[in-house]
Amino acid sequence: MIMTRTWLYCAILSFVLIFSLANGHEIEGTTTSPYRIVIDGGSTGSRLHIFEFLLNNETNEAECIGRGSLSVWTPLSDFANASNNPHAVAEHLFPLFDFAATNIPSRYHASTTVTYQGTAGMRLLQTQTQQDVYDALYEGLQSWPHFVFSSLQRHHIATLDGNEEAYFAAVAANYLHGTVTANLTRREPSQQLLGALDMGGSSTQIVFRKEQQQQQQHSRKLHPTHFSSTSYLSFGAQQFRTKLWDDLSSKYHHHHNNTSIHNPCAFSGHITTHNAHTFVGTGNATHCAMHINNLLPHHELHTPPHNAQTNFLAMSLYFFALDCLKEISLLFTTTHPSYAKLHDSWPNPSIQELTDALDPFCLHSWHHDLQPIQHHAHKYTSPNILPHRCFEAVYIVTLLRDGYKFPLSSRSITFAHLLHGNQVEWSLGMALSLHDAHHHHHHESSLDVVVVVKNEEDICVGKNSCTLEDDCRHLLSSSLS
């Protein structure tokens, strides 16, 4: 466990050091850009975020401000077999870069750093396949006549490790909460750090502060060793839903011969097909939770400490699914009492309040209640996603309650998508970390040699900066000679 934690620190420091060294000098004939572009290459598509770093004249502190984001709903992993066609791989991202070029002043185009990070969808591919796709993406962007972000280098396109993704989510959470500044300095050393909960289509992450006596002391700077981070690949909502369907079909056909299968994790009456099987929703959240619990790897789940000092910010699908549950409850004249409790306590509902709201939510008739309003049921839910919100809500609450063991009375989780005008995303945490590394490269000569000890024999050193692939094994003597 100690080696895992120190490897994570080495990987993250190496990651930000590579970027700071690669972008540490102003490009000749250009103006240094206050903007950073971070692209989240997720399992359902890619989302480009624009961040601007400004000095607040009133507080004399740097601030990171989101300047817009745009998504395309084709995942990069879909091009695993198309890496011999760079234009085809890159073309689906052209609208994102057109959007960025429009929203970033032209004088900053050449010096704006672009970072593309593939997450769980890419982590599911073989390593060589990942590299082939990234090579094609880079070549396709460079050969596109309208690509204006000329500082992009090949190593800016890579796969983000799941534990790094979790750490960056914690950085974003603590910055937006006001616990740390934009240079990742804790405002009050005694203030408790927030944890973070994140879920996408293919993975889910949990990160929480360590007990004080377990933390390595690194002054007031936010540091990976302040946190315990875990990522669970294949336990994102899409991947787990497929597991559930496969499990239901396997168990059902031991006892039945027809192809229609009752699905307790879908809205009442909703019909879908999977592997030639027809699933008919029964909207039974209690039975759905039982099936989900049978599939959860309870012995592998990392349970956080549950006390008054451990609080979390839940983002991404945690927010979208449960906010949908809350908002849809307001659309019907006959409101279940559990909905009123959930609405009144939002965004800090107890686990019990969430649990109580699941059954009436899933029991909504798909044909009579939800299908007629599918285009405007919820701000963050498209018509093709709405049918899956019952499953997602039950899965999330079951994972929190029975997997991570949050007490039923717990209100330690805040569900959020926007705070202070910024989206709550790991990409913000990465932008802050890269900006901080870049800032220190310019202002601290001591960054010329950085030594991180993984164990007594393995050393990761400064300007011969290690990559995420080489396991941080560099000889100290070669760098200092």
Image: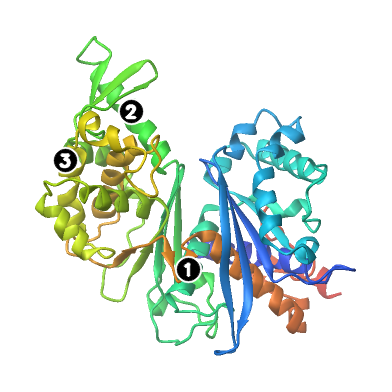
**Amino acid carrying mark 3 in the image:** Thr
**Can residue 457 be seen in this snapshot?**
no
**Amino acid carrying mark 1 in the image:** Gly
Q: Nearer the viewer, residue 370 or 242?
A: 370
Image: 376 above or below 261: below
Q: Position of residue 238 (x, y in %)?
A: 41, 38
**Can residue 322 be seen in this snapshot?**
yes
Q: Secondary structure at mark 3?
A: helix
Foreground mark, 1 or 2, reads 1
**In the shown orientation, is residue 358 left or right of residue 135?**
left
Image: 90 above or below 260: below
**Residue at the right extreme?**
28
Foreground mark, 3 or 1, reads 1
Q: Position of residue 258 (x, y in %)?
A: 24, 10
Task: State the CA–CA distance, disc 3 to disc 1.
Answer: 37 Å
**Amino acid carrying mark 2 in the image:** Trp
Image: 143 above or below 266: below
Q: Nearer the viewer, residue 337 or 79?
A: 337
Q: Which residue is mark 1?
A: 421
Q: Secondary structure at mark 1?
A: loop
- Image quadrant of residue 100? bottom right
Looking at marks 1 and 2 on the same chain, the residue that comes earlier in the sequence is marked by 2
Q: Secondary structure at mark 2?
A: helix
- Image quadrant of residue 197? bottom left
Q: Which residue is mark 2?
A: 245
CB atoms of marks 3 and 2 within 8 Å: no
Q: Position of residue 166 (x, y in %)?
A: 48, 59
Label 2: how many residues lie within 10 Å, few (<14), some (14-19) or many (20+)?
A: some
